Image (cartoon, rainbow, N blue to C red):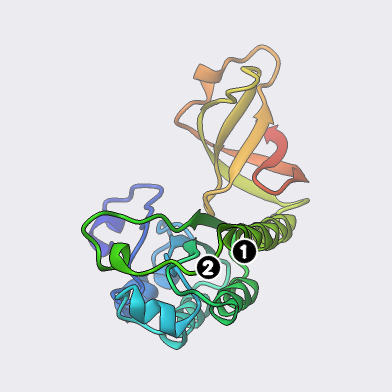
């Protein structure tokens, strides 16, 4: 990260790390290297220590939350995302509640949620699944509702702010709208100014004044 930072490249994304591996040195980079973007994917999978052990994740809930606290100390504005599996074999309501509470505590910008499905050749594939599908689905729906609430709340912090956007192209739904990414990896939309085309902006960093903050995107006006 330090070596790439020294090249002067405008944006560096350290995409993801296994929670057992993310070191103090990497965390420090988030706080000291200006071109390391303040966004990190740290896949927790479950908030229950018992389930984490069954998954062979080799870290605990406490270790994970300690890493999050250090990250936020180094980079208070860091946007966090994660992966979570609901319905791992043997997961109880208590186990699920531990996951739900962790998601609520961390306040992720984005969570990729999955219902467990067996993968051939893994130890979990041989474990009995004694939780009815309708129970797993209800837990999953409960978690998704919380995830959406957290994502919407996190995006409200950008309302009225000006964010730097790296333009990727145009919206899939409307080719008069530019789309790109903020430093926190949020999707940002802005109308193409009159007399301009998307080619005038693609690959450039532009300033966008955020006028609307939705659950999964920001919208605003482009500053020339």
- Whole-percent x and y of residue 39? 48, 59
Look at the picture and state if 177 lies above or below 62. Answer: above
Q: Residues within 10 Å of mark 1 (few under 14, many from 20)?
A: few
Residue in the image at 63% along x and 69% along y: 107
Viewer-nearest residue: 129 or 124? 129
Label pair 1/2, CB-CB below 8 angstroms: yes
* 53, 130: nearer the viewer: 130
**Which residue is denoted by mark 2 in the rendering?**
131
Q: Where's residue 194, x and y in %?
A: 70, 15
* Residue 212 sits above or below residue 108 on the image: above
Quadrant where the N terminus is found in the figure: bottom left
Structural distance between the alpha carbons of marks 1 and 2: 7 Å
Q: Residue at x 62, y 39 (%)?
A: 188
In the image, 122 versus 149, the foreground residue is: 122
Q: Which residue, given by chain and number where applicable, does mark 1 sit on?
A: 135
Q: Quadrant of the C terminus?
A: top right
- Secondary structure category for the residue under label 2: loop
Residue depicted at x 72% and y 52%? 161
């Amino acid at each position: 990260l330090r070596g790439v930072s020294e090249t002067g490249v405008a944006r560096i994304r350290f995409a993801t790390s296994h929670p057992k591996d993310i070191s103090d040195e990497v965390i420090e980079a988030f706080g000291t290297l200006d071109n390391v973007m303040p966004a990190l994917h740290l896949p927790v999978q479950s908030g229950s220590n018992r389930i984490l052990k069954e998954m062979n994740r080799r870290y605990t809930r406490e270790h994970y939350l300690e890493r999050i606290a250090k990250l936020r100390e180094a980079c208070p504005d860091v946007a966090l995302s994660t992966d979570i599996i609901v319905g791992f074999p043997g997961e109880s309501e208590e186990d699920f509640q531990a996951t739900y509470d962790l998601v609520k505590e961390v306040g992720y910008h984005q969570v990729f949620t999955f219902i467990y499905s067996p993968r051939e050749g893994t130890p979990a594939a041989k474990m009995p699944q004694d939780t009815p599908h309708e129970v797993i689905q209800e837990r999953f729906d409960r978690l998704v509702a919380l995830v959406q609430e957290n994502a919407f709340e996190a995006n409200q912090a950008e309302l009225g702010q000006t964010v730097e956007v790296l333009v990727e192209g145009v919206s899939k739904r409307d080719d008069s709208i530019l789309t790109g990414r903020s430093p926190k990896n949020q999707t940002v939309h802005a109308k193409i100014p009159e007399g301009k085309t998307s080619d005038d902006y693609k690959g450039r960093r532009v300033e966008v004044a955020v006028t609307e903050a939705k659950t999964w995107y920001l919208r605003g006006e482009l500053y020339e």
